[in-house]
Amino acid sequence: MTDTTHSASSRFEIDAPHRELLDQVLDKWSLQVLNELCERPLRFSGLRRLIPSVTQKSLTSTLRRLERNGVVERIVLSTRPVAVEYRITPLGKTLRPPVEAILAWAGEHLPAIEAARNRFDDEQDGRI
């Protein structure tokens, strides 16, 4: 698909490092974790309570990916027993505006998207 209103030099390219980063920070669980951590730092159990559908394994994996990418930091608290808290980093906070823009776009265009999905599904049902 080409958009003839833009020059070839203005097209964006998604190469392997970009794709890997987007896959790691914009997946289903990462977005929910980031949403919660934007509000306040939380312990693992607090995140599990706020996102009940995520498994322990998926949440652990998500937090590690976000930490590896510098979006979330893991803080060991000097309590008895020792506890761990997760908080969003300044870099992680910079993700909020683009994610909000995508969500606003989706909200604005969701009726058209649902209509397109219905047309597609109806056409597929007619072929069977």
Image (cartoon, rainbow, N blue to C red):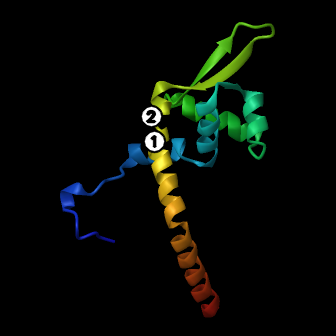
Amino acid type assigned to the residue bearing label 2 in the image: Thr
Mark 1: secondary structure: helix
Residue at 60%, 92% in the rendered image: 127
Q: In 3D space, how far apart are the residues under numbered discs 1 and 2 (Cα atoms)? A: 7 Å
Between 72 and 97, the one lying in front of the other is: 97
Q: Is residue 104 left or right of residue 46?
A: left
Residue at 69%, 26% in the rendered image: 42
- Pointer 2 residue: 94
Between 125 and 3, the one lying in front of the other is: 3
- The relative height of residue 81 versus residue 2 in the rendered view (above or below) is above
Residue 124 rendering spot, x and y as whole percentages? 60, 86
Mark 2: secondary structure: loop
Res 34 → quadrant: top right
| Label 1–label 2 contact, CB within 8 A | yes
- The relative height of residue 14 versus residue 24 in the rendered view (above or below) is below
Residue neighbourhood size for the residue with mark 1, other residues' Cα within 10 Å, grouped as few (<14), some (14–19), many (≥20): few
Residue at 80%, 7% in the rendered image: 80
Between 91 and 58, the one lying in front of the other is: 91
Residue 97 is tagged as: 1
- The relative height of residue 14 versus residue 8 in the rendered view (above or below) is above
Q: Is residue 23 left or right of residue 53?
A: left
Residue 18 rendering spot, x and y as whole percentages? 40, 45
Residue 25 rendering spot, x and y as whole percentages? 52, 41
Residue 67 rendering spot, x and y as whole percentages? 56, 28
